[in-house]
């Protein structure tokens, strides 16, 4: 039976940042997946339901703006909450219906975790897609 | 947190954003309350003086303007710093006598935390302060249920 969960997707091409965020969130017991570009993120979004996306904008292969276009096309009830990870120099004309906020790099880890915790706490757990694999954070990556 | 911490009120109808702001701001040297509507916000400002009010300018049914009107009528001499968050897609007329500063959505969370803290800390309390119950951030309101399920 599909389990109810609030899964998080971290999308960033910087492996160090991806690993850092993954580690921080996993250590706090959250279900986390990662993607290193927009194309991987869309693949993940097609497989699993996500409660929250931490989304970098400037990425190779497919950037974060393209991912936002995809999310905009989803039914509002199926959209994850999106927090942008920015370098601070990107255009800021994002749709507030899609993006709840942004955090500039280098980010304050505590503030970032508070942001995630606040968002996650009010999101209702939804049944995961049956074919969705276990979250990376729940599998032994060693 | 000390009882004398600068007190702020977050008025936002988006649940995820309101609780996220509460969670972020309560870890600043601030006492934080929240409201999801103009009526709830008025109930709060009737009982407490806020150094800073962070107001969503896009509350439904023009509630933001209604709140500003009612708040300024109720407390015309209030020193509260009103920081309004607006959706830049909508062209709103802002009365500079009612709003001190504007930030655009989506919010830059780190910048906002700095701005709210710095502004709130320089606002002096009024000469005739309202009696004020403990803030939500001081009485153990906890939205940090980050369990995966």
Image (cartoon, rainbow, N blue to C red):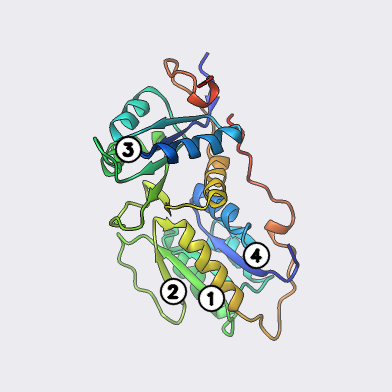
Q: Chain of mark 4?
A: B
In 3D space, how far apart are the residues under numbered discs 3 and 4 (Cα atoms)? Answer: 36 Å
Q: Is residue A4 left or right of residue B139?
A: left
Q: Secondary structure at mark 1?
A: strand
x, y (%) of residue A65? 27, 44
Image depth: mark 3 or mark 4 in front:
4
Toward the left, the furthest residue is A61
Name the residue carrying label 3.
A71
Residue, far top: A1
Residue at (54% x, 31% y) in the render:
A125
Quadrant location of residue A46?
top left
Mark 3 in CB contact with mark 4 (< 8 angstroms):
no
Q: Are marks 1 and 3 in contact (CB under 8 Å)?
A: no
Q: Which residue is mark 1?
A: B81
Query: Are dots 3 and 2 on a single chain?
Result: no
Q: Could you tell me if the residues under marks 2 and 1 are in contact, i.e. CB atoms within 8 Å?
A: yes
Distance, label 2 to label 1, CA atoms, is 8 Å
Q: Position of residue A43 (x, y in %)?
A: 32, 26
Q: Nearer the viewer, mark 4 or mark 1?
A: 4
The chain under label 1 reads B
Q: Which residue is mark 2?
A: B101
Q: Chain of mark 2?
A: B
Instruction: Estimate the spatial distance between the alpha carbons at disc 1 and disc 3, rounded to whole Å.
Output: 36 Å
Separation of disc 4 and disc 1 at Cα?
Answer: 17 Å
Q: What residue is shown at x 69% (from left), y 51% (from top)?
A: B141
Q: Up-down: is A34 above or below B96?
A: above
Q: Specify whether disc 2 shares its chain with disc 1.
A: yes
Residue B29 circle label? 4
The foreground one among B16 and A25 is A25
Q: Residue at x 54, y 27 (%)?
A: A5
């Amino acid at each position: 039976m599909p389990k109810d969960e609030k899964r998080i997707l971290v999308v960033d091409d910087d492996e160090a940042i991806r690993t850092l965020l993954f580690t921080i969130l996993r250590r706090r017991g959250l279900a986390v997946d990662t993607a290193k570009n927009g194309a991987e993120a869309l693949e993940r979004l097609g497989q699993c339901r996500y409660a929250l996306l931490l989304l970098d904008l400037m990425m190779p292969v497919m950037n974060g703006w393209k991912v936002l276009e995809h999310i905009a096309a989803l039914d509002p009830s199926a959209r994850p909450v999106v927090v942008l990870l920015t370098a601070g120099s990107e255009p800021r004309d994002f749709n507030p219906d899609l993006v709840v906020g942004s955090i500039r790099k280098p980010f304050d880890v505590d503030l970032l975790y508070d942001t995630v915790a606040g968002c996650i706490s009010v999101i209702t757990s939804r049944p995961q897609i049956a074919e969705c694999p276990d979250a990376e954070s729940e599998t032994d990556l060693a | 947190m000390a009882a004398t911490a600068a007190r702020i009120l977050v008025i936002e109808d988006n649940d995820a954003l309101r609780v996220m702001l509460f969670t972020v701001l309560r870890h600043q040297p601030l006492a934080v309350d929240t409201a999801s509507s103009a009526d709830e916000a008025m109930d709060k400002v009737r009982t407490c003086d806020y150094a800073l009010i962070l107001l969503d300018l896009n509350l439904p049914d023009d509630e933001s303007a209604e709140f500003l009107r009612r708040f300024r009528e109720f407390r015309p001499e209030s020193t509260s710093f009103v920081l309004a968050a607006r959706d830049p897609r909508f062209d709103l007329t802002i009365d500079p006598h009612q709003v001190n500063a504007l930030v655009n959505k989506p919010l830059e969370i780190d910048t906002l935390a700095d701005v709210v803290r710095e502004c709130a800390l320089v606002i002096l309390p009024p000469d005739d302060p309202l009696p004020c119950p403990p803030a939500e951030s001081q009485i153990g309101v906890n939205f940090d249920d980050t369990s995966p399920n």
